[in-house]
Structures are given as C-alpha cells and as structure tokens.
C-alpha cells in the first residue's frame, strides 16, 4: 500500500511542478509518435478482445448486449 501511495504522491507532484514553473514548449514530434503508437496498440488490443465476441452467433450477441427484440424488426424502428 505504501508503494502505491508514494507513486500517487510523486505523480501528483510531477503534474503540479510544471504548472508552478512552466518551461518553453519544445518540439512535439515525440509526443505525436507516442500518441500514434498508443492508438495503434489500443486498436490492436480492442480488436483482439472483440475477436471471440464476433465469433459467436448473432442471436447470442444480442442476448449478451441486452437486445431482446426479434431479428425481423420493422425498418421504422432501426436507427
């Protein structure tokens, strides 16, 4: 518990320190590279997580999602 408390305190300090003593902005290239890579990795993770879900029959997916309507619904009710 102490490790998480110290980590949280340091994280808080590192977030407040730049607000108290701002520095001039530098080249944001690495920021965008990291942001792009995180988007790619999160997309891969999401795709891998949904793969088992997409392999299930459509009727089972509807039950999981809470959709109890029959598969032949009228076009006026579709979004």
Image (cartoon, rainbow, N blue to C red):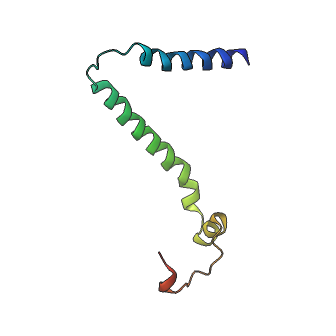
58 versus 69 height, above or below: above
Which image quadrant for residue 29? Answer: top left
Q: Nearer the viewer, residue 78 or 21?
A: 21
Q: Nearer the viewer, residue 33 or 14?
A: 14
Q: Residue at x 32, y 31 (%)?
A: 32
Q: Nearer the viewer, residue 55 or 25?
A: 25
Q: Residue at x 42, y 17 (%)?
A: 18
Q: Nearer the viewer, residue 47 or 25?
A: 25
Q: How many marks?
A: 0
Which image quadrant for residue 7? Answer: top right
Quadrant including the N terminus: top right
Q: Residue at x 32, y 30 (%)?
A: 33
* Residue 48 horizontal/vertical position (percent): 52, 47
* Residue 35 horizontal/vertical position (percent): 37, 33
In the image, farthest residue toward the right: 1
In the image, farthest residue toward the front: 20
64 versus 23 height, above or below: below
Q: Residue at x 54, y 15 (%)?
A: 13
Q: Is residue 74 left or right of residue 65?
A: left
* Residue 45 horizontal/vertical position (percent): 50, 43
Which image quadrant for residue 23? Answer: top left
24 versus 44 height, above or below: above
Q: Is residue 33 left or right of residue 75?
A: left
């Amino acid at each position: 518990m102490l490790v998480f408390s110290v980590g949280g305190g340091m994280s808080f300090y590192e977030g407040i320190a730049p607000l108290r003593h701002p520095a001039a902005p530098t080249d944001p290239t690495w920021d965008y590279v990291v942001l792009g890579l995180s988007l790619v990795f999160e997309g891969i993770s999401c795709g891998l997580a949904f793969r088992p879900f997409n392999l299930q029959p459509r009727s089972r997916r509807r039950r999981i999602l809470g959709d109890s309507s029959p598969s032949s619904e009228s076009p006026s009710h579709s979004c």
